[in-house]
Image: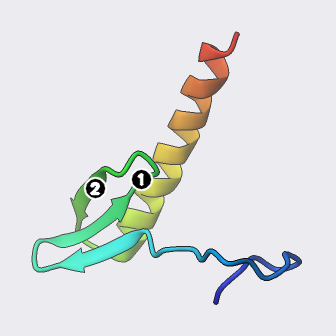
Amino acid sequence: MKVRAGEADRSWFRSERFIHTSDGWYFMTRENTQEGPYRSITEAENELAMYIRLTNQVDQFSNV
């Protein structure tokens, strides 16, 4: 079971966020949406990072 460094073992596990199909690469969000397709896993990883940043900014402004 994969856990983050320094964390105790838990009964849960991290699921893979990236999916590869014949159409390309996708990533899954916490909201259970599938975003993509992207041409490479690197592009999908970059888009996921941007998605997380934008989501955090929206959350920050909605709590003001």
Q: Is residue 50 above or below residue 23?
A: above
Residue displayed at 46% across by 60% down: 46
Amino acid carrying mark 1 in the image: Thr
Quadrant including the C terminus: top right
Residue 17 is situated, as x and y percent measured from the top left of the image, at 43, 68
SS under mark 1: loop
Estimate how packed mark 2 is, as few (under 14), some (14 to 19) or many (20 or more) residues with alpha carbons within 10 Å: some
Image colouring: rainbow
Q: Quadrant of the N terminus?
A: bottom right
Looking at the image, which residue sits at the far bottom? 1
Q: Depth check: 3 or 59 in front?
A: 3
Residue 29 image offset from top left, x and y in percent: 41, 53
Q: Nearer the viewer, residue 64 or 10?
A: 10
> Can you tell which quarter of the image residue 40 is in?
bottom left
| Pointer 2 residue | 34
Q: Residue at x 62, y 74 (%)?
A: 12
Residue tagged 1: 29
Q: Earlier in the sequence, mark 2 or mark 1?
A: 1
Is 52 located above or below residue 48 in the figure?
Answer: above
Q: Give the residue at x 46% y 45%.
A: 51
